[in-house]
């Protein structure tokens, strides 16, 4: 896809599917993003709310035992594994970083359960860095529309950073997730109501098959 069309598609996604992050605190963004892995937004919101009501900061959470988190974060799924990781993260942050969340990718991905997507969300949302977080929605949609032709989220991240202006990197994830949850569904995408159908390679292929 030509560069000017890529930029147009990205801007239209940002316009039609705006998503704002209300939470900016690095620690809470980090923990909420870990909780969000393999679950729906509503489950993440519920688990995060309950967790932070009892353990509001890194220090209180670092003193917790994993089993104390189970009932609080059960709605997020895989709650036993997530509880272990979250407590480990809090303890490492206190012991190694003085309670502060690192502001660089290299250190963030060393934390238990923190991959590039989670790290980039923290960098983009909390530290306002030019970081492009690629999850399954971003990877799937970018390939379906025709922005990239890649086989993994990492490849998608690398390709998107080459074709999307740096000032838009931090804005992409939220709107793409919203787009993927409401219109560009994994199965049976709602192409008839999609504002990007005219630019979408997937939709064009469907049209030629009819």
Image: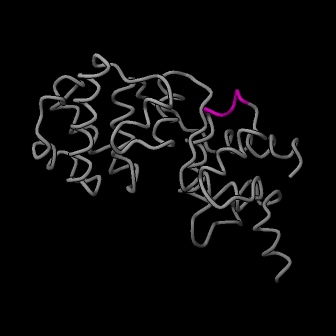
Q: Quadrant of residue 158?
A: top right
Horizontal side, residue 60 vs residue 104: left or right? left
Q: Quadrant of residue 141?
A: bottom right
The spot of residue 55 in percent (x, y) is 18, 30
Indicate yes or no whether the magenta region holds residue 167: yes
Q: Is residue 121 above or below residue 179?
A: above
Q: How many marks?
A: 0
Q: Residue at x 47, y 36 (%)?
A: 119
Report the predominant secondary structure element of the magenta stretch.
helix
Indicate yes or no whether the magenta region holds residue 86: no
The spot of residue 37 in percent (x, y) is 39, 51
The spot of residue 147 in percent (x, y) is 76, 52
Q: Quadrant of the C terminus?
A: bottom right
Query: Between 169 and 202, which is closer to the camera in this rendering?
Result: 169
Q: Is residue 114 above or below residue 203?
A: above
Q: How is the image coloured?
A: one colour
Query: Between 24 and 98, which is closer to the camera in this rendering?
Result: 98
Horizontal side, residue 191 vs residue 60: left or right? right
Q: Farthest residue toward the top?
A: 98
Q: Is residue 100 above or below residue 34?
A: above
Q: Residue at x 82, y 82 (%)?
A: 209
Q: Residue at x 61, y 51 (%)?
A: 138
Q: Residue at x 64, y 66 (%)?
A: 190
Horizontal side, residue 73 vs residue 110: left or right? left
The spot of residue 196 in percent (x, y) is 75, 55
Horizontal side, residue 199 vs residue 141: left or right? right
Query: Between 58 and 88, which is closer to the camera in this rendering?
Result: 88
- Residues rendered magenta in the picture: 166-170
């Amino acid at each position: 896809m030509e560069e000017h069309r890529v930029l147009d598609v990205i801007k239209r996604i940002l316009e039609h599917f705006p998503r704002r992050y209300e939470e900016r605190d690095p620690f809470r963004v980090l923990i909420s993003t870990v909780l969000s892995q393999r679950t729906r937004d509503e489950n993440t919101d519920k688990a995060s709310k309950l967790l932070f009501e009892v353990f509001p900061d890194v220090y209180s959470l670092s003193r917790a035992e994993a089993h104390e988190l189970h009932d609080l974060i059960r709605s997020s799924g895989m709650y036993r594994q997530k509880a272990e990781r979250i407590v480990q993260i809090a303890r490492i942050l206190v012991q190694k970083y003085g309670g502060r969340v690192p502001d660089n990718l290299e250190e963030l991905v060393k934390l238990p359960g923190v991959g590039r997507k989670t790290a980039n969300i923290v960098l983009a949302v909390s530290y306002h860095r030019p970081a492009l977080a690629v999850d399954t929605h971003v990877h799937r949609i970018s390939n379906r529309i025709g922005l990239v032709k890649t086989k993994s989220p990492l490849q998608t991240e690398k390709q998107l950073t080459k074709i999307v202006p740096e000032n838009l990197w931090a804005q992409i994830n939220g709107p793409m997730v919203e787009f993927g949850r409401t219109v560009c569904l994994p199965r049976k995408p709602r192409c008839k109501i999609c504002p990007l159908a005219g630019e979408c390679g997937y939709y064009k292929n469907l049209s030629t098959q009819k």
